[in-house]
Image: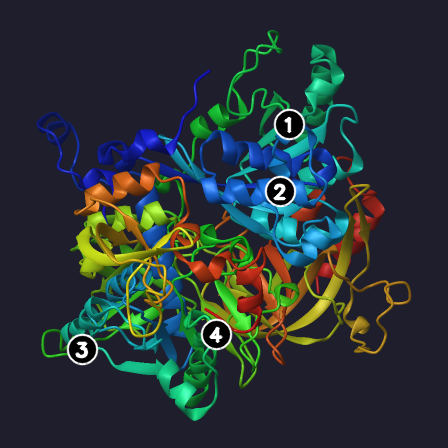
Amino acid sequence: MTTTTDLATADPTVHAQRDLLRLATAGSVDDGKSTLIGRLLYDTKSVLADQLSAVERATAARGGSEAGAVDLALLTDGLRAEREQGITIDVAYRYFSTARRAFVLADTPGHVQYTRNMVTGASTAELAIVLVDARKGVLEQTRRHATITALLGVPHVVLAVNKMDLVDFDEATFRAIADEFARYAGAIGLTDVRAVPLSALAGDNVVDRSDRTPWYDGPTLLEHLESVPVGRDAHAEAFRFPVQVVIRPRTADHPDYRGYAGRIASGAVRVGDDVTVLPSGKTSTVVGIDTFDGPLDEAHAPQSVTVRLADDVDVARGDVLVPTGETVTDGADLEGTVCWLAERRSVLGARVLVRVGTRTVRALLREVNARLDIDTQTVEVWDGIDTQYTVDATDTSSDTAPRALTLNAIGRVRLRLAEPVVLDDYATHRSTGGFLVVDPADGTTLAAGMIGPTLLDRLTPTPPPSAADDDWLAGAGI
Amino acid sequence: MTTEATAPPTAAATAEQSPQRPAQRLTQLDALESEAIHVMREVAGEFERPVLLFSGGKDSIVMLHLARKAFWPAPVPFAVMHVDTGHNFPEVIEYRDATVERFGLRLVVASVQDAIDDGRVVERPDGSRNPLQTVPLLDGITAHRFDAVFGGGRRDEEKARAKERMFSLRDEFGQWDPRRQRPELWDLYNGRHKPGEHVRVFPLSNWTELDVWRYIEREHIELPSIYYAHDREVFLRDGMWLAPGEWGGPRAGETLETRTVRYRTVGDMSCTGAVESTASTVADVIEEVAVSRLTERGATRADDRASEAAMEDRKREGYF
């Protein structure tokens, strides 16, 4: 057995090459998710002696498991309320690493009432682990996790077929589950799916290769996590630079310095590139890319830099630098798919704030024109028209307010913005196509959204009836 | 920041490709650095009166270094605040004052001793002042009307911290309510808050202890000398080596002896333990941390051992 550990990376030259993979897991305790994460942490030597002894004490205090074995699930145990209820409520972040890669794992609960937490964890993940119990196969919950993964545009998916020890490591059982999932995943647009047969409890194929699955010649879960390609081809992506702050030192050393600080959201930029400031449309040329460590000739996502321009154009926080010549969609009519995150339901006509990139603008919720039933993967289309401008915040029942989105609902909305913003389609611009809907009164994040009118439809294996689709198009064409 | 391509190119590589063409992925440390700088700039863009908590500990020193990078060539655009337990390592106070002087920072001190003198807090029977920092911290935030407070907390430190957000909303009593946390998606941090509320911001959320040390090495960041091996008179209590002082020891039955030690965290001197170590350079420390079998809090913080939910309870009350 070989175990890769962080110990191997005390050599700084090895560590200097190491990159970072952000991943998310969705599942419930029943699927063995906590045990799987505990196993990853334990077998990569990411659990230290005092953490382990705390878990040993806790295992014993709760009646214990057999013969001094540690309950690995307790390694991911969180808050008191969660321990008391035996559930995971919130997203927890875990860290482990190998010689080749460091991992940030967003551990999210799997039940439908925690959809918003899954959405949160998936938003920054480059890989999602969808967990199934080999005895149960692909369930409604599995499809829901896959749907959220597809909705948030997570590029890589691992189907972890867990508890293989309870089906005698039967190849046919594994193949049937993997095939069923692959068909479903393909239908909703997930392209990179890898199925791994494993037992989190016993450790088979998690970190160490199992000798009980001789019929499986693929990688172990950790081997796959270490080798899946991360990062993006910056030269194939459009350059986007949301300005965070204007740097104007006005010091004796830098009396006239004026630079625009931000993190490159996508693509790359070189000194000499012609850029356009949106939404003003003013154009200029990049004359400097500055960092504390010295100037760069070229920078790419996700570097944090400060850009200087040739002309004294008006640039402020919230503006976006894009390549001059590229057709970039901007406007004040935002259509997108949202996940509703707040306890209070959506209200048509509500005055809200919309946050896109570094820009926050006032907005009006004009329409909620479709809702996704996440368990049946069907879209219910509502003909959203402006006559639905009824503000009735007192009606909190979702039954009598059918055009409202309630906590964890996924639906399609149209927002009228007070000022234009860059409207990159999330499906092709994952790092700039996301937005938040915020309540201006108390700052509550009401919803998280993805720009683009068609996203929801792609998640339905069977397209909605064409008549309803036409109705919606008519409604949307105002 | 460095990308792979900014490493000294070999002759063959220089001949074949432009040395300016960067690699298209960042190394782990570059990714963490860029994320932290992004978070700090978001705070500068969204808040009126941010402050950076600066204890002279390694995490706050790394935060300050990142702040200097984020706004260069402009100076750091916010004040630093030290919550002073009064049980200080002299080396750390020297470091704090030298740093403030060197970078022209505005230092605000929130004093536990003052709070005890005023009767706002009461000294604990065990003499530890780490848990007493919450009151002067909150009073300092209120008095200076700080609306964003940078802390060096990391999610790998402890299980309650594992659920902490980058932007963590606190009510007017400074309380953290894990059930009321805002979902945090992509890199869109929502810092809006009502008057009287403030936001704690943790730019090092995704760093581990080893990442912090590797970054200190890479960036040649100077630390207070107590982080490196030195001879010190210490006594053993509850399996930890503590330094003597007017406030807490040694008691009867505890004997002073000289050991070669270093500190993994900086806190109230009366309850922050030293570890026996010969690590006298950053590289030595990295090697030691990489093979360590104890977390830094488990090894050296008596107050964090108190109960399974010690940190969760203190965070709810408004602790760092």
Q: x, y percentage for residue B27?
A: 32, 41
Q: Residue farthest to the right?
A: A400
Residue density around tag 2, few if under 14, some if 14–19, many if 20 or more, within 10 Å: some
Q: Which residue is mark 3?
A: B104
In the image: residue A126, left or right of residue A69: left
Q: Is residue A275 above or below residue A87?
A: below
Amino acid type assigned to the residue bearing label 4 in the image: Pro
Q: What residue would you read off at disc 1?
A: A201
Q: Chain of mark 1?
A: A
Q: Which mark is residue A230?
A: none
The answer to whether residue A301 is visible is no
Q: Position of residue B299 (x, y in %)?
A: 40, 50
* Same subunit, tags 4 and 3: yes
Q: Residue shown at 32%/53% (left/top)?
A: B33
Discs 2, 1 touching: Cβ within 8 Å:
no
Chain under label 2?
A
Residue at the image position 53 percent from the left and 75 percent from the top: B192
Alpha carbon separation for disc pair 4 and 3: 39 Å
Q: Residue at x 22, y 58 (%)?
A: B233
Q: Which residue carries the number 2 mark?
A: A74
For mark 1, does the 10 Å Cα neighbourhood hold few (<14), some (14 to 19), or many (20 or more) residues?
Answer: many
Q: Mark 2 is on which residue type?
A: Leu
Label annotation for residue B125: 4
Corner quadrant of residue B68: bottom left
Residue A11 x %, y %: 24, 32
Label 1: state its secondary structure. loop
Q: CA distance from mark 3 to mark 2?
A: 47 Å
